[in-house]
Amino acid sequence: MHRYVERVVDLLDPSLNVLHDMTEDEARARVLSADPDAVRGIEGSFALVARDGITVCMARSLDRPMRYFLAKRAEGPALFIADRMDTLRSALAAEGLAHQFHPSYTRMVPAHHVVELRLVGCPDPDPTYTRFFTPERSALPPNLDVIGQRYIGALAFAVARWLQHVDRVSSGTAPIGVCFSGGIDSGSVFLVVYDTMRRLGMSPARLKAFVLDAGGPDVAQAHEFLDRLGLGLFFEAIDAGPEALDLQETLRVLEDYKPLDVECAALGLRLFRGIRERYPEWRFMLDGDGGDENLKDYPIEENPELTIRSVVDNLMLYQEGWGVGRIKHSLTYSGGLSRSYVRTYAPARRYGFDGFSPYTRPSVVEVAEGIPFASLTAYDVPTLYGLKGDIVSRGVKAMTGFDMPVFPKRRFQHGAIPVETLRTSLIADEAACRRAVHALFA
């Protein structure tokens, strides 16, 4: 009887794993067990592959994109794993397997799940998915002071662990940057980072609030935010014009085609490029990505598939989309922030930054899912939109003492550059972008 010879090619960069209180071998053993409680106990940022014979298990945190491609060989299946499509394609080409590649044949490991594959040979069975993070919904009392303190308290704990990691892997003097707009998410992250650095005895002189200035309203907002709190010395603008936006380069880096994510990535690339040009050695950056998802602060009216009830009543809808096993779940891209976090991750990695989005940490998401949104909003859309600023500002006050300014919501890309200028400089039509992404791999 013929026996296939299976092969696993792990192309992930292990230096990007930031694990707390355990070794990478211990974390891999937990992934291989596929025990939800054991995998949930992995603290930090990770993308891990574990293997036992023909069984391969993969798991990732929300902030670490992870893809795989199962190639066919005469001697047996070969599983390639990486964070990018182009890395998978290059690896296949090096093995003489490029003819098998198509971007739609790659698969993204969905966040918060262990994906288990059995490499048994042709035909390989479908993977199995085991959820390892299921936060309890509506577990908190309908008290905004309690909710805010718990939410920002979890954020502060995540920030403290990351800052301690930074000092362990650097000289203890590495500069810290925050992608800043003066909005609720980046503003709260900046204030918590500043407060935590002081509590840990770290010099706040290491900290900067980087604001992308492409002619949009964020520069004035960021100035006002910091000046009101006496923190204006941390402000630093990165200048850019609309001519700096490059759709093809953005699609090449992003490897996705959703217009809002394309816009966000294009401006993110310009911000990180500007920081890199000014500071060649800068490494560590934070941002507020995940905050909108946690507190359900996206315009429901912009998406005809959504209602206030679907947003409020579905577990982690904005983090995971409709979810694994649902008819609209994309195997190629997954869904929600599990998919779209590439807009943050890829631009930062393109310019050599180690990024951190503390609002994506499970301990923070868990508090957010525990908020009793239904009882607090009575399914009223304007009330839902007002909830975020109220919760976060109360939490920031309780944890840091700062009276945080709260401004109306605005997407990062629409604050960095006027919307009209953006839409004429970067025409991100979804169908055209999808074709362009596929053309990258033709």
Image (cartoon, rainbow, N blue to C red):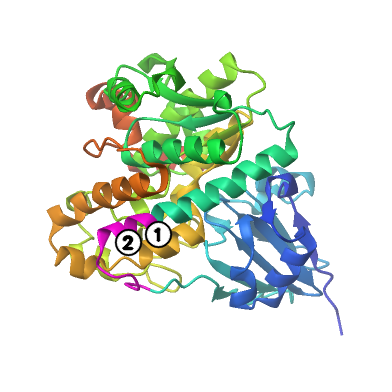
Identity of the residue drawn at 39% across and 72% down: 326
Residue shown at 28%/20% (left/top)? 220
Q: Is residue 150 visible?
A: yes
Give the SS element for disc 2. Answer: helix
Does residue 159 appear left or right of residue 15 in this picture?
Answer: left
Magenta segment: does it hold 139? yes
Label 1 sits on residue: 150
SS class, disc 1: helix
- Percent position of residue 18, x then y: 67, 50
Residue 241, position in %: x, y?
A: 38, 14
Residue 43 drawn above or below residue 350 = below
Q: Which mark is residue 146?
A: 2
For the record, the magenta segment spans 137-149
How far, Cα to Cα, is label 1 from label 2?
6 Å
Dot 2 amino acid type: Val
Q: Are marks 1 and 2 in contact (CB under 8 Å)?
A: yes
Q: Residue at x 74, y 77 (%)?
A: 120
Task: Characterize the local packing of mark 1: few (<14), some (14-19) or many (20 or more) Cα atoms within 10 angstroms.
Answer: many
Q: Is residue 45 above or below residue 205?
A: below
User: How many neighbours does mark 2 have within 10 angstroms: few (below 14), some (14-19), or many (20 or more)?
Assistant: some
Res 425 → quadrant: top left
Q: Position of residue 262 (x, y in %)?
A: 40, 37
Drawn side of residue 197 relative to residue 304, left or right? right
The C terminus, quarter of image: top right
Would you say 157 lies left or right of 381 here?
A: right
Q: Amino acid at mark 1?
A: Arg
